[in-house]
Image (cartoon, rainbow, N blue to C red):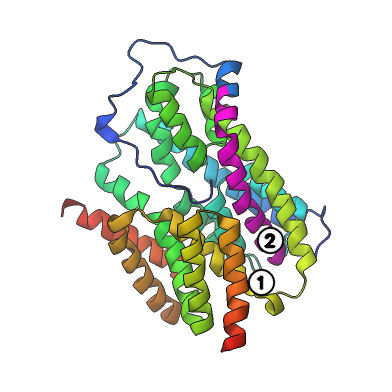
Amino acid sequence: MTAGNQHRPDGEERDDGEPTGRTVTFDRHGVRAGFLTTLPIAVGVGGYGIAFGVLAARAGLSAAEAALMSATVVAGASQIVAVELWAEPIPIATILLATFAINLRYSLMGAALQPWFSQLSAKQAYGSLFLMADENWALTMRDLRSGSGRGAFLLGSGIAVWTFWVGSTVLGTIAGGVIGDPAVYGIDFILAAVFVALAAELWKGRSSLVPWTVALVTALLAAELLPGQWYILAGGAVAGAVEVIRYDE
Amino acid sequence: MSEALSLDPLVVGVVLAMAVVTFVTKVGGLWLLSRFEVSDRLESGISVLPGAIVIAILGPELAEGGPAEWAAAGLTLLVMWRTGNILLALIAGVVGVVAFRALA
């Protein structure tokens, strides 16, 4: 949900467990299996939910507004970035662009489900994808590749994550409201700490080194040269472009 | 501080727009795949975006801080790596920054 592990869809090597003539089901047994398998991980998602709620409250969002965001967006890292960008007046274009850029990886993850989801109805497939987050996608891929044929696994798995994500968001906003003056107790540092934790989860080993260095240098330069918070999108865009260019190396 | 249940129409509008943008990214891959091929090259560029954006936010923010913030960030990272527990890591970071600021 949050940042999660960016498991890369396998492209051509999608050989194991691919449904060869086998029917993909969509029933309550699949929903149940997905829900129960994901529950322990959904509890961990709650940790980020509480952090998000605290930050949302500090950004001036009400508990209802933060809960609405968690319930309808269902994408943790982009939500945390959005409340970081939140200001008066709301920088709508920047927030929507950042949301799009951060969540673009979901297109790749959704595409990896195609061999199974192409056998579901549009309503079943797109309805399940609404609840797709990093954690439940990874568990669903594992289940489908094992040959279970449980097309409803993502839905059940997503329901487990969604429930804890929304619930912990509300708890976080209440905690954030109680805290009061931020600077005294080091609360002003929570946001930086959340991003450090996100970075630790997003680190994919040596392959992250070049894009992250590029993003860091670009952002530091852009923060000096450009107005507002364009340095955030600049850092992401240049890192992505450099990765595309050096792909052959 | 706004009331817990208040819903500002503009905020609701921005939140719903975020929801639409996110839903488009979630269903876009499945929808596009039956029509176009996403190259591995483009895929590798897209997959670095979340980490790069997190770093782009964190870098300038830490650059504005001082030794106390840098030490606390290091402590947060260490606890996150060792325990994998986000709440413990955040608590360590916040307690750490208070302690390091007192020392400074």
Report the residue at 46% width, 65% height from top: B78
Subunit of label 1: A
Residue A248 in percent (x, y) is at 16, 51
Q: Quadrant of residue A38?
A: top right
User: Secondary structure of the magenta portion, mostly?
Assistant: helix
Residue A186 in percent (x, y) is at 65, 75
Q: Is residue B78 above or below residue A186?
A: above
Magenta residue check for A173: no
Q: Which residue is mark 2?
A: A54
Q: Which dot marks residue A175? A: none
Q: Is residue A188 above or below residue A154?
A: below
Q: Which residue is mark 1?
A: A187
Q: Secondary structure at mark 1?
A: helix
Circles 2 and 1: CB atoms closer than 8 Å: yes
Magenta residue check for A37: yes
User: Three-letter amino acid code at disc 1?
Assistant: Ile
Q: CA distance from mark 2 to mark 1?
A: 10 Å
Q: Secondary structure at mark 2?
A: helix
What span is in magenta?
A33-59
Total label count? 2
| Residues indicated by labels 2 and 1 sit on the same polypeptide chain | yes
